[in-house]
Amino acid sequence: MYSIGSSRVFDPYVQVMQNANLTQYIWDKSLLQPLWDYLRYNHQDALRSPLFPVFLSVSTYFSLCSCYMILDFLAPKCPALNRYKIHPDQHVTWEEVFKTLWHTGYNHIIFVFPATVGQWYWRPPIPLKEEAPLLSELLIGVLGCTILFDFQYYIWHLTHHKVRWLYTTFHALHHKYYVPFSWSTQYLSAWELISVGFWTTINPIILQCHCLTGFVFMFFNVWISVDDHSGYDFPWGLHNIIPFGLWGGTVKHDAHHQKVQCHFAPFFSHWDWLFGTYCDCTRSPAVLEMQKKKREAGGDLK
């Protein structure tokens, strides 16, 4: 599934970071080697199985969605939490949860499971390299896979909105929910689910990543996708941490569900800036209040 050699694509960048002496302990491969040795020695059969990436993605998805579901049902009874919802007056119902869960399960049983069994039957176990990737190599690999995925999905997404037949046939299902919530993340047509799964699987191969880097990217991809659909604007969200509005996040993806002609990129914002598909976004009441206090504090200092 993944190249067993080092990430040759990223070798020049890793070398530059190492030569810059950016805290030698952070980039020392020994940080990941004990973890990798433990995984290889104790879970080698699982890691080598073609079934493992699917198990990792599915288990991560259901675990994260379950956590957000708990927040969704606590929010109406907890004003402090509800204020971080982008739409505090809209609450998730059990009917919506069961409907999205049924559809997700149907897609996995009818499409994902047969493809996984076929892959398991025809492909040999994945060989594992003895050396773990450098931490710098892993981080750059995950970033590279994320940037590539962001470009792939932006083109796919924009095309399926501009071509009416593609939208009505494949993508309209995902926009059934005007206000997204965690379980609506994979409320998708089979074609869209297969496309997303294909890029998530193939990108680490294209960029010649270590298999551990590929597994981390899969986890990161699912986490960010679920977070984008969660409907919460927490201060610690990546879109509130990464500067210059470069990261999309839940606020911008929620705006896409409100105004379907903006914010097509799943993660970053640069493609929407370049192609004129960026628009203003509505924040949660709590974050708006925090921003107002910061502005007032800045005005007092002046």
Image: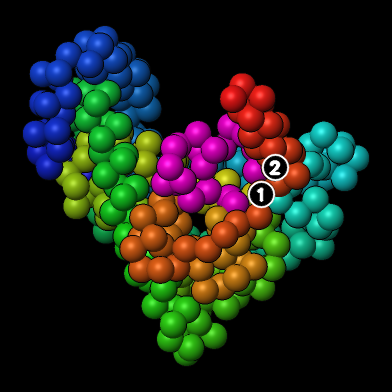
Q: Residue 199: give x, y in percent of width and height.
A: 33, 58
- Could you tell me if residue 119 is visible in this image? no
Quarter of the image for the C terminus: give it: top right
Give the quarter of the image for residue 289.
top right
**Viewed as shown, does residue 185 lie left or right of 69?**
left
Q: Image point 47% across, 63% down: which residue?
A: 278
Return the residue nearer the eye: 197 or 234: 234
Q: Image point 22% across, 11% down: which residue?
A: 24
Give the quarter of the image for residue 166.
bottom left
Three-letter amino acid code at the position of disc 2 = Leu
Query: Is 246 a magenta residue?
Result: yes
Q: Image point 25% across, 11% down: which residue?
A: 23
Query: Is 165 a magenta residue?
Result: no
Q: Image point 27% across, 31% down: which residue?
A: 138
Mark sitting on residue 288: 2
**Segment tinted magenta in the rendering:** 232-251
Q: Secondary structure at mark 2?
A: helix
- Could you tell me if residue 77 is visible in this image? yes
User: Does residue 51 sit above or below 213 in this rendering?
Assistant: below
Q: Residue 259: give x, y in percent of width and height.
A: 60, 70
Contact (Cβ within 8 Å) of mark 1 with mark 2: yes
Q: Residue furthest right?
A: 77
Q: Secondary structure at mark 1?
A: loop
Three-letter amino acid code at the position of disc 1 = Arg
User: Does residue 302 sit above or below 174 in this rendering?
Assistant: above
Q: Residue 86: give x, y in percent of width and height.
A: 71, 51
- Within 10 Å of disc 1 (Cα), the crowding (few <14, some 14-19, many 20+) is many
**Viewed as shown, does residue 31 lie left or right of 169?**
left
Q: Residue 266: give x, y in percent of width and height.
A: 45, 57
Which circle's residue, 1 or 2, is located before the other in the chain?
A: 1
| Residue corresponding to mark 1 | 283
